Image (spheres, helix red, strand yellow):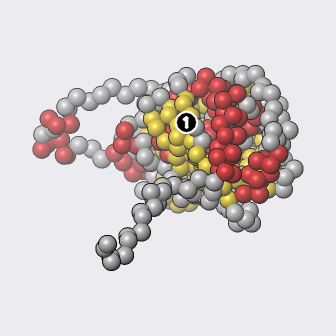
Amino acid sequence: MSTEAAEPEADVWNGLPRVTRRQVELERRFAAWQGGGPLSPVFAWLGEAVRTSVVFDRPEVDWRAAGLGRPGLSAQLRWPRKRTRLGLGVEVPIAHAVVDRLLGFDRPFAETRLQLTPVEWGVWTYLIVRCLEEINGSLDLSIDRVSPDPFDVDGLGDVVTVRWAVRVGDVAGAVRVWLPESLADAWIDAGTSGRQAPKAASPSPKIRALSADWRVVAGKVRMPGGLRRLRVGGVLPLADPPLTGTPSDPVGPIEMVCDLGASAGGWRIAVEPLAGSSARSYRVAGPLVQQPGTRTPLNLGNDLAMSPHDQDAPSPLDAPVTLTVELGRINLPMGRLADLKPGDVLEAGRHSREPVEITSNGRLVARGDLILIDTELGVRVTSVFL
């Protein structure tokens, strides 16, 4: 008989993931909500809105705050009845894919990993509000903020993460929900808590998906000699439509503008400054109007055929340009934009003594003060950024 000590048997379970009963129960509950409960109309509406397949895999529960630092958008939701907060995270590829489908934009592959633009934050703000309308019922959830900052878990105690692998068309990524562990335990213990009959999904027009900062455009400035002629102290008369009144209290028909880029177009709303408001309040004077984008033809090889003499081409600063004079900006929430009608009043944060901004294709090139030129208003340039 051998005197050697017997080796301990290897633990065949060692290295395998440990799954608790609570984790399995919470995954089962979210899967049930997804398959026919309150989450199913959200997925159905979202797929109809983006006009492509939106596939959510089975939820996976991680009993910790996982993925908080993943790039993308983060939404914080309030639940006053429960006196707590929830978090929603959408990874960058999925966030871009949904916006592109909604707006009909063909994003270059090199930009699919870039952070979201302000317009995209606005689109996603509306989407989240719209999804909350589908599932709210007795939940009483409301949106607190949407931003690139990670969800703040301070004060929530232990946090549970629910993750879905998601595919929008041929784009794959993940969506996460963060919730306090105490709330997860309450749902598990309550059995059928939170189950509601799904509401009928209703499609939404594409225009309701637009938001972000809207620029209050006082008018245009035409510079046939190019930006090189822009000088501090120079006086620029405003082109159509003319703005009258006084520099501290301008009046006249102007526009609020939300640009999506040359290829995607944008949106316009006719407004008028309220008399006596010092350009802080604006009355809506017309409906929301879409401005179609322009398609730029591909340049197939002309750049490669440039000769050395082409380097003597005129500077872009000498090219004729039309500048935009902005009185200020208004951040328009999605619900407000959807219900906007002529006669409504919008508030801006600009003070009458603040300078106006002069932009070219959305890029700030100068600032100035409103001045009176005869009976119409113009701008005296106070600083140039070229």
The residue lying toward the viewer, choosing from 242 and 118, is 118
- In this rendering, is residue 350 above or below 240? below
Name the secondary structure under disc 1: loop
x%, y% of residue 43?
64, 30
- Residue 237 appears in the figure: no
Going 50% across and 32% down the picture, which residue do you hit?
168
Q: Quadrant of the N terminus?
A: bottom left
Q: Kindly identify which residue carries mark 1.
A: 57
Tell me the quarter of the picture where residue 259 sits: top right
x%, y% of residue 224?
42, 39
Tell me the quarter of the picture where residue 39 sits: top right
- Residue 346 appears in the figure: yes
Residue found at the far front of this picture: 1
Q: How many marks?
A: 1
Residue found at the far left of this picture: 308
The residue lying toward the viewer, choosing from 354 and 336, is 336
- In this rendering, is residue 216 above or below 229? above
x%, y% of residue 196?
81, 32
Residue type beneath disc 1: Asp
x%, y% of residue 235?
55, 51
Going 49% across and 49% down the picture, which residue do you hit?
115
